[in-house]
Image (tube, rainbow, N blue to C red):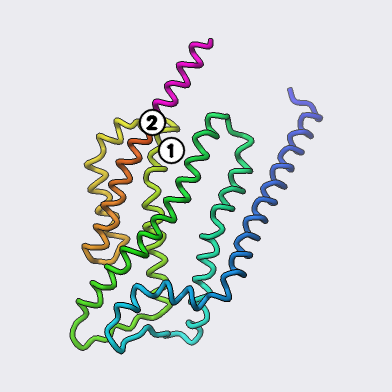
Amino acid sequence: MTTPADDTDQELSLIDHLLELRTRLIRAVLAVVVCMLALVPFARTLYSAVSEPLVSRLPEGASMIAIDVASPVFAPFKLVMVLALLLAMPYIIYQLWAFVAPGLYQHEKRIARPLLFAATALFYIGCLFAYFLVLPLIFAFITKIAPEGVAVMTDITRYLDFVMVLFLAFGFAFEVPVVTVVLVAIGLVTPEQLAKARGYVVVGVFFVAMLITPPDVISQTLLAIPVWMLYELGIVFSRMVVRDRDAREDAEASDD
């Protein structure tokens, strides 16, 4: 039976957690704002860098256009907001980790730390993969197959939306190893089940790539094959997690 003192302690504990969560959220927002303020002076330069995969492959005399009146202002600013969020992501993840870490067991912390680092790194790698490899191939393909007499002049806002979708698609797709390890770590699946489902995963990966990439075989293949390879990598790491967990359980059993 709980006493009034126990209820008061629980209420204070809840309030303390909410106050800490508010502090963490404020710090995360401030980090994004600081990154935005640092990037705003370079907004035009950053947009030029992001648009380079298309601009460098446009036919001679062609250029990007701005359909809306405010597009030359809003498109670079939108890019700055997205880049600020991406730059601040490690700090945001750290604030999230600092909030939940006190409630985790030691072995859970040992697994969570590398997973958080890997998730962040893989997301950035996916975005870089899209920028340096996928976008140049896509735009080279698009500009070459444009019908005779059709001027390829993309609106700057629509181009940015297209690029951001690809960045997010490849960034999240590259999280496959982390997802597989987490599923195995919490006991939902086993590495053997993941290996048996390989055929279905390959078909599903190509189907999803067809839905979220432009309608060309190049970009679909460039998304599907790396995700498949990352799935295989996730199986390897998940087996390591299982071996570590079994070893820890055997050690605890021997201590008892």
Picture layout, residue 241 above or below residue 52: above
Can you give x and y, in whole percent of width and height, for residue 207 in the image? 25, 54
**Which label is found at residue 240?**
2
User: Residue at the spot x=41%, y=79% of the render?
Assistant: 156
User: Residue at the spot x=44%, y=21% of the render?
Assistant: 247
Can you give x and y, in whole percent of width and height, for residue 176 in the image? 37, 46
Picture layout, residue 255 above or below residue 65: above
Residue 126 located within the stretch drawn in magenta: no
Other residues around mark 2 within 10 Å, as few (<14) / some (14–19) / many (≥20)? some
- What secondary structure characterizes most of the magenta part? helix
* Mark 1: amino acid: Val
Q: Which residue is mark 1?
A: 182
**Circle nearer the N terminus (2, 1):** 1
User: Residue at the spot x=53%, y=29% of the render?
Assistant: 107
Q: Which quadrant of the structure image shows residue 159?
A: bottom left
- Left or right? Give the position of 135 relative to 144: right
Residue 255 located within the stretch drawn in magenta: yes
* Mark 2: amino acid: Met
Other residues around mark 1 within 10 Å, as few (<14) / some (14–19) / many (≥20)? some
Can you give x and y, in whole percent of width and height, for residue 59 in the image? 27, 84
State which region is magenta: 240-256
Picture layout, residue 18 above or below residue 31: above
- Quadrant (top left, top right, bottom left, bottom right) of the N terminus: top right
